[in-house]
Image (cartoon, coloured by chain):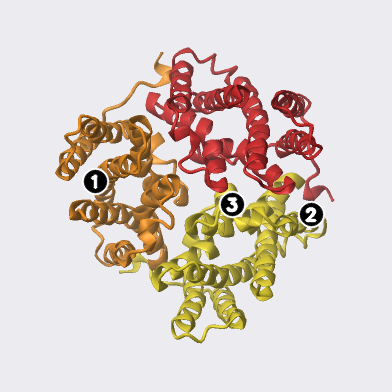
Chain colours: A orange, B yellow, C red
Amino acid sequence: MDLLPVVLDLLGIFVFALSGALLGVRIRFDIVGVMVLGAVTGLGGGIVRDVLIGAIPPASFNDWRYLAVPLLTGLIAFRFHPDLVKIERYINWSDAMGLGLFSVLGTQKALIVGLDPIPAVLMGILTGVGGGVLRDLLANRMPSVLREDVYALPSLAGSLVVVISWELGVFRSWMLIPAAALCIVLRLLAIRFRWSAPRATDW
Amino acid sequence: MDLLPVVLDLLGIFVFALSGALLGVRIRFDIVGVMVLGAVTGLGGGIVRDVLIGAIPPASFNDWRYLAVPLLTGLIAFRFHPDLVKIERYINWSDAMGLGLFSVLGTQKALIVGLDPIPAVLMGILTGVGGGVLRDLLANRMPSVLREDVYALPSLAGSLVVVISWELGVFRSWMLIPAAALCIVLRLLAIRFRWSAPRATDW
Amino acid sequence: MDLLPVVLDLLGIFVFALSGALLGVRIRFDIVGVMVLGAVTGLGGGIVRDVLIGAIPPASFNDWRYLAVPLLTGLIAFRFHPDLVKIERYINWSDAMGLGLFSVLGTQKALIVGLDPIPAVLMGILTGVGGGVLRDLLANRMPSVLREDVYALPSLAGSLVVVISWELGVFRSWMLIPAAALCIVLRLLAIRFRWSAPRATDW
């Protein structure tokens, strides 16, 4: 059993749970709401992926670490959250990291169960954005993937790195790290420099 | 085949469907909308649970009673709903009963298919809150589980009773009733006395 | 392999994706958001259906055409959308066509995998309304199925034609076309003449 994907998966759960829990703090949920929103954000993308590829029950239900990580994260965010002024920035950072990690892990898992390249990319994007979409739906916000200017494209980029190296037969587990890093850097640059894609009303 | 879980399941579907249908009446849906919102609320939690544990197609699709109960409930709520002034209270009561019944039934079903104790508790809570979350998403409200102060904790309490008695080897079907009652009473007390969990902004 | 259902399925994906992409244009999403909203609307109903009947991974993940159609539709809608004044009408038309096609296809697919008549009708309606519900949730609107006066009933009508002809043993693939047409015509008439079902507050 290759350890790296598990470590990256738990890291992805942690950062996504952090983004959900911090959003919960910002919109003044109580401690239970903060933990629930953190857990849904951290586990949601992986559960959606597992349901769609038939890995039932989802991996996160058979391994206590997958549940302990988001719940502890919720508690920590609740107790030690940064100033409310700075909180939006931390939400964006942790969300970007989760997007990167889950996009490449979701793509890899789809390839392992035998999906073709294009569906595997789709599954990677779904895994990457799934947790954040559930978080935003529950918090009654327009999901980031639609609201933010450049959100799905970084996920696509990370996913493509995995699929292309897989198809060329050179994929190794460690390549998940630069692939995720590519997505994370692109997403953070998009936030920093307010990159925007064209809008229909511009035409 | 043990009859009690089926009876409790249909009762849970009835009370959750009632909460959804009454909410539909309150926000002035037409008769079809009331029936749809009732059916989604009544069946949603169980369908989510069945998808996640791999019981496909969901039990509610193979048994006409599981469909007849929420649709008839919708019709009844539409025709004989209480005064709009009192309707919120009835929504809360039926929602609390559904939460209790589905939390303990979801936990039991997860244990039967072989999940470990902690995932089984998680599945119980998901089953208990699932229908209400779908109801609130469709009605464009913030889901109760996040909005209400003490909502998930009663579900956790009922779930724990089932898991602990199961692990001790003393579980019997009739124990579903006191376990559900514990959850329902806690939830109603939380509503009555406006119990609230700590908020991050208090710190 | 019968070609007609595949053609109708792709046509349904096209028209639903068009409704989602046009809604994205209208609420001023960027090009990625328009394509994502189109893809979710076009593929959502079918994915929900496939998950619920255990056809995992969903058909749309194993066939590149199922992905190419909604993404190209999104691009086309983005580039060549009609005047914003007329756009609502086109959203309604394409949504009605998608509702009709997916309602009858979902019912047929459920019957093929062995569901009973009533669950098959339910599955048809879920397939028909699923994509539109996801579209409206992501766009933070109240879902059409609840908001619109006569929405689920046309879906029920088309679904019943399929189930009844199947049960009588006279079902042939071409009957999907008049069944879908019945649903589409009823839905368009409902829009045109503002048919409305009774509301609870009328009583």
Between the residue at mark 3 and the residue at mark 2, the CA separation in whole angstroms equals 26 Å
Q: Quick one: SS at disc 1? A: helix
| Label annotation for residue A97 | 1
Rounded to the nearest angstrom, the CA distance separating label 2 from label 1 is 48 Å
The image position of residue C125, as x and y in percent, is: 67, 40
Q: Residues within 10 Å of mark 2 (few under 14, many from 20)?
A: some
Tell me the mark number nearer the camera, choosing from 3 and 2.
3
| x then y, percent, for residue A126 | 38, 40
A168 or C133, which is in the foreground?
A: A168
Q: Secondary structure at mark 2?
A: helix
Image quarter in which the C terminus of chain A is found: top left
From the top left corner, tell me how far across and down residue A165 is, in percent: 20, 32
Instruction: Name which residue type carries label 3.
Output: Pro
The kind of residue tagged 1 is Met
> In the rendering, at what x and y percent does residue C68 appear?
43, 23
> Which residue matches tag 3?
B57
* Picture quadrant where residue A145 is located: top left
Badge 1: chain ID = A
Tell me which residue sits at (62%, 67%) in the image. Answer: B98
Neighbours of disc 3 within 10 Å: few (<14), some (14-19), many (20+): many
Query: Which residue is rendered at x = 37% and y = 48% of the image?
Result: A45
Q: Estimate the spatial distance between the alpha carbons at disc 1 and disc 3, rounded to whole Å.
A: 36 Å
Task: Check residue B75 in the rendering and tell me which mark sits there, or answer none.
Answer: 2
